[in-house]
Image (cartoon, rainbow, N blue to C red):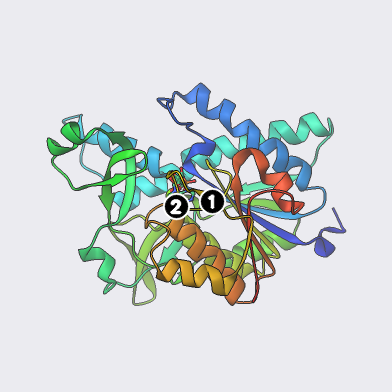
């Protein structure tokens, strides 16, 4: 473990589908099983890279909201507490599965792992608080969605609940994460985009929102000096005219082209938009490599053989 300082730093952001696949209900055994696909690859990659793992929580935080809405008697928990809960539940599942995969690779595996509760500072005045855009929870049909007591948005997966998703400003635990990385830990952090907080004097106050995990991951990548930033999701990468007859998979594009396409609104908010934006921000702030790929192709994407790679220029 004493050569860790010389290995490049890799950040892999896992989408909600790393745990729940299309068409699955999200039974816990399915979620553990699904996690093996990315974590087997990450276990191998950890021999050549220092690793940070971040993850989404859209399906899980939505499920917690539904659960508390369907039970009377217990006090209502605000969204920020539910985000904290998902960092615990998903962090536990990732950490234990990764430990298993590392042990399968090397029976006397001694790799240090740590899941860190992470806050992310947002701005109280962020216009997103008046304009919810982040889809969470299960997908509904249009008829079902019309009967729901909250706002929904039509996504590629169906109608989903939307909540406020303010811009992440800084990751509160960035120094702790850097320290853990320097000490040879694989760190799981910024789950669900981080627990959204605003500054209050010298302390923090949680707020009712869910930060986009792709944007939070890009920020963490910048604040910890990541070399390779991978966003793993349920499609092989970004496409133009997604879902249409003339769909065109993007294999490689420059940041300036990505900016042009984003400005033209070619990637929807709440799904591919923030991924493209996240990789663009990472590269613009001095990052070297950024790739959007499928959960199955993380290792290939790191090798430069899969996904949508965005390059400087
Ligand atoms: P994650 O949980 O990994 O963040 P999202 O649902 O937020 O997943 O984003 C991935 C989804 O983005 C894909 O399943 C796909 O339906 C959708 N999508 C929308 N536009 C595009 C596009 N232009 N190219 C590829 N996928 C797209
Ligand atoms: Mg997403």
The residue wearing badge 2 is 241
Residue drawn at x 18%, y 32% is 144
| Rendered image quadrant of residue 76 | top left
Looking at the image, residue 17 sits to the left or right of residue 207; the answer is right
The residue wearing badge 1 is 248
Disc 2 to disc 1, how far (Cα)?
Answer: 7 Å
20 or 246: which is nearer to us? 246
Residue drawn at x 82%, y 52% is 48
Where does residue 44 sit, x and y in percent of width and height?
78, 42
| Rendered image quadrant of residue 253 | bottom right
Please report whichever mark, 2 or 1, sits nearer to the chain's N-terminal start. 2
Please report contact status of discs 2 and 1: CB closer than 8 Å, yes or no.
Answer: yes
- Label 1, residues with CA under 10 Å away: few <14, some 14-19, many ≥20: few
Looking at the image, residue 206 sits to the left or right of residue 239; the answer is left
Residue drawn at x 82%, y 58% is 4
Where does residue 16 sit, x and y in percent of width and height?
47, 41
Q: State the SS at label 1.
A: strand
313 or 299: which is nearer to us? 313
Q: Is residue 171 above or below residue 235?
A: below
> Residue lying furthest front in this view?
246
For label 2, being within 8 Å of ligand 1 is answered yes
Q: Does residue 78 appear in the picture of this structure?
A: no
Where does residue 313 sit, x and y in percent of width and height?
64, 77
């Amino acid at each position: 473990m004493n050569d860790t300082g010389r290995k490049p730093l890799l950040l892999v952001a896992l989408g909600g589908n790393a745990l729940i696949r299309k068409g699955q209900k999200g039974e816990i055994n399915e979620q553990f099983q699904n996690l093996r696909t990315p974590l087997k690859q990450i276990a191998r990659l950890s021999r050549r890279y220092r690793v940070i793992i971040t993850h989404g929580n859209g399906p899980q935080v939505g499920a917690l909201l539904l659960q508390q809405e369907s039970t009377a008697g217990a006090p209502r928990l605000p969204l920020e507490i539910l985000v904290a809960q998902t960092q615990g539940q998903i962090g536990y599942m990732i950490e234990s599965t990764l430990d298993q995969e590392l042990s399968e690779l090397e029976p006397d595996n001694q790799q240090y792992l740590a899941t860190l509760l992470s806050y992310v500072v947002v701005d109280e005045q962020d216009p997103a608080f008046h304009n919810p855009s982040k889809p969470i929870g299960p997908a509904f049909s249009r008829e079902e969605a019309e009967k729901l007591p909250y706002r929904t948005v039509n996504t590629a997966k169906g109608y989903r609940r939307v909540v406020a998703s303010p811009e992440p400003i800084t990751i509160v635990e960035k120094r702790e994460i850097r320290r853990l990385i320097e000490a040879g830990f694989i760190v799981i952090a910024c789950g669900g985009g981080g627990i959204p907080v605003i500054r209050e004097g010298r302390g923090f106050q949680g707020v009712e929102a869910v930060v986009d995990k792709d944007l939070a991951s890009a920020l963490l990548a910048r604040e910890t000096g990541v070399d390779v930033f991978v966003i793993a999701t349920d499609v092989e990468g970004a496409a133009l005219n997604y879902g249409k007859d003339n769909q065109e998979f993007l294999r490689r594009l420059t940041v300036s082209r990505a900016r042009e396409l984003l400005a033209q609104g070619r990637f929807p908010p709440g799904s591919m938009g923030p991924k493209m934006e996240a990789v663009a921000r990472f590269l613009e702030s001095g990052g070297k490599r950024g790739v959007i790929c499928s959960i199955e192709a993380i290792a290939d994407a790191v090798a430069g053989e899969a996904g949508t790679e965005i390059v400087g220029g």
